[in-house]
């Protein structure tokens, strides 16, 4: 590792410092070509007001040898790697690195995020059975969050159709959440691709979900929302996609239960209403053409 990349991994494992502070220190290091920070400099530059005790303790523990041992234990692509997705570099506070299991080549394909209800109805299943195989035939990688409901079915249908799928999770790759998707999780780590910005051993925490969602939105060319209620977490992913200049698609649903009220709100706010696969492909022509170029 060169000095800046070593600092990057040190920041990944550093406790008591959020992603904003980590990027603040990394930008300082790149601007002034200086990486040998003592703990007082770290606190001053990051303007941290969090757990300074945890920060000081972990900073002293993170030696070059310790970091190298941790890095050797799992595969990762750092922000400075040529394999790091260009689309992720343009989002606010991108992941410092992507830890992964599976086929990292999937990151080079055009992709679309499929997100929606954890308690998906038969209607959502029917929609996905219609859409996913056709999207797979167009060489689009299906990206989702390896949760129950729409996420799980999107991954499973992509695999069933012989396609490629990427799962983005909010904990270490040695943890599976929720447990109901453990079989799919193991299969995807071996034959598809599972990503996390968190190293091994990181437990799931509430704030990890929106952090995970920003990766899903940033990684893909567009986000399609199926069966989202007014306060659905899928709407966070859709908003993040909009913030990053990505396409947002919404599947209309029935109006009585409120199961699709979030989707209807997205459509009113300008998301493209989707009732056939072509509605998605019409908005992504440049990505498909770029991929098909020799």
Image (spheres, rainbow, N blue to C red):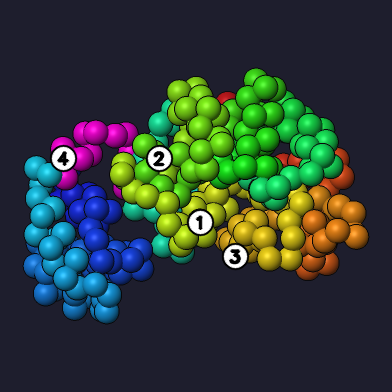
Rendered location of residue 239, percent (x, y): 63, 63
Mark 2 vs mark 3: in front: 2
Along the polypeptide, which appears first: circle 2 or circle 3?
A: 2
Report if the CB atoms under discs 4 and 3 are less than 8 Å apart. no
In which quadrant is the N terminus drawn? top left
Disc 4: which residue: 68
Disc 2: which residue: 175
Circle 1 sits in a helix, a strand or a loop, which is it?
helix
Relative placement, left or right, of 151 versus 260 is: left
What are the residue bounds of the magenta stretch? 67-81
Report if the CB atoms under discs 1 and 4 are less than 8 Å apart. no
Which residue is depicted at the point 11% across and 74% down?
40
Which residue is depicted at the point 71% across and 47% down?
119
Mark seen at residue 243? 3
Asked if one can make out residue 164 in the rendered structure from this viewpoint, the answer is yes
Mark pair 2, 3: CA separation: 30 Å
Circle 3 sits in a helix, a strand or a loop, which is it?
helix
């Amino acid at each position: 590792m060169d000095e800046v990349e070593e600092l990057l991994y040190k920041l990944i494992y550093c406790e008591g410092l959020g992603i904003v502070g980590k990027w603040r220190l990394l930008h300082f290091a790149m601007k002034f070509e200086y990486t040998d920070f003592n703990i007082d400099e770290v606190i001053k530059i990051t303007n941290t007001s969090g757990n300074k005790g945890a920060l000081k303790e972990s900073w002293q523990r993170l030696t070059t040898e310790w970091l190298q041992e941790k890095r050797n234990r799992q595969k990762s692509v750092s922000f400075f790697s040529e394999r790091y997705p260009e689309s992720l570099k343009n989002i606010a506070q991108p992941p410092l690195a992507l830890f992964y299991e599976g086929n990292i080549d999937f990151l080079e394909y055009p992709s679309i995020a499929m997100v929606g209800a954890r308690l998906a109805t038969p209607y959502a299943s029917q929609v996905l059975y219609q859409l996913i195989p056709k999207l797979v035939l167009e060489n689009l990688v299906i990206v989702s969050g390896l949760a129950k409901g729409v996420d799980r079915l999107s991954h499973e249908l992509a695999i069933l159709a012989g396609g490629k799928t990427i799962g983005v999770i909010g904990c270490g790759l040695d943890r599976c959440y929720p447990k109901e998707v453990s079989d799919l999780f193991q299969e995807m780590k071996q034959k598809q691709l599972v990503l996390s910005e968190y190293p091994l051993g990181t437990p799931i925490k509430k704030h990890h979900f929106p952090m995970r969602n920003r990766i899903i939105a940033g990684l893909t060319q567009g986000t399609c929302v199926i069966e989202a209620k007014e306060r659905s977490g899928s709407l966070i992913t859709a908003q993040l996609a909009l913030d990053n200049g990505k396409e947002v698609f919404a599947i209309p649903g029935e109006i009585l239960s409120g199961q699709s009220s979030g989707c209807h709100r997205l459509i009113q706010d300008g998301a493209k209403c989707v009732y056939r696969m072509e509605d998605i492909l019409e908005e992504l022509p440049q990505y498909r053409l770029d991929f098909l170029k020799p």
